[in-house]
Image (cartoon, helix red, strand yellow):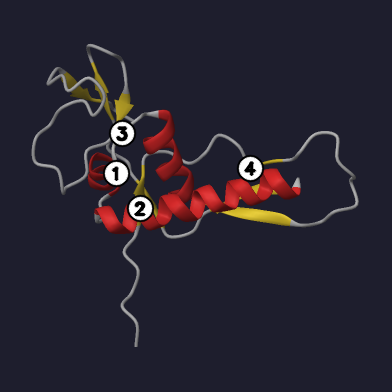
């Protein structure tokens, strides 16, 4: 019997339901399903420019697990680009966080998982943060 999957912490779901390639034949019904945790891994590593250890702590998972999720996401996106197929976002094993913080210095909104002891902004490392009332 395999070990149950731990839920991956996702700060916010994607702001889109999917992407479709422009200028291709409309007859193709293939698509790639990008899980919320895969989207979060791409966002943290490539958009927010975090290293895998920092990003894994934010998601509440181990660094090797983060690396596997990130690699799977990259392969799915590459397949969608090369084969010109649609990308759809699906929930997966995500846990959406409800405690949001804002950095007073850089205005970044983020969450702090229980696995991180110090309370500081993940981008600028400022300790000038406050809890948002959501």
Of the residues under marks 4 and 2, which one precedes in the sequence? 4
Q: Distance between the residues labelled 3 and 1?
A: 6 Å
- Mark number for residue 20? none
Q: Residue 17 carries which label?
A: 4
Marks 4, 1: nearer the viewer: 1
Mark 1: secondary structure: helix
Q: Are marks 3 and 1 in contact (CB under 8 Å)?
A: yes
Q: Is residue 115 above or below residue 122?
A: below
**What SS does tag 2 mark?**
helix
Which label sits on residue 50? Answer: 3
Instruction: Identify the mark at residue 67; answer none if there is no mark.
Output: 2
Q: Do the residues labelled 4 and 1 touch (CB within 8 Å)?
A: no
- Where is residue 83 drawn, in percent x and y? 74, 50
* Nearest to the observer: residue 106 or residue 78: 78
Label 1 sits on residue: 52
Q: Which residue shows up at 24% across the image and 19% down it?
A: 103
Q: In this view, does 65 lie above or below 128?
A: below
Alpha carbon separation for disc pair 4 and 3 = 25 Å
Q: Quadrant of the N terminus?
A: bottom left
Res 9 visible: yes
Residue 85 seen from this side: no
């Amino acid at each position: 019997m395999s070990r149950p999957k731990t839920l991956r912490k996702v700060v916010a779901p994607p702001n889109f339901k999917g992407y479709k390639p422009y200028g291709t034949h409309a007859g193709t019904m293939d698509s790639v399903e990008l899980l919320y945790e895969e989207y979060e891994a791409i966002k943290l590593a490539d958009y927010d420019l975090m290293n895998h250890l920092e990003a894994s702590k934010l998601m509440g998972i181990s660094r090797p697990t983060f690396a596997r999720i990130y690699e799977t996401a990259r392969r799915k996106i590459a397949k969608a680009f090369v084969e010109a197929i649609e990308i759809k976002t699906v929930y997966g094993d995500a846990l959406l966080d409800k405690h949001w913080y804002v950095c007073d210095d850089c205005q970044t909104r983020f969450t702090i998982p229980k696995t991180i002891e110090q309370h500081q902004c993940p981008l600028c490392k400022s300790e000038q943060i406050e809890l948002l009332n959501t």
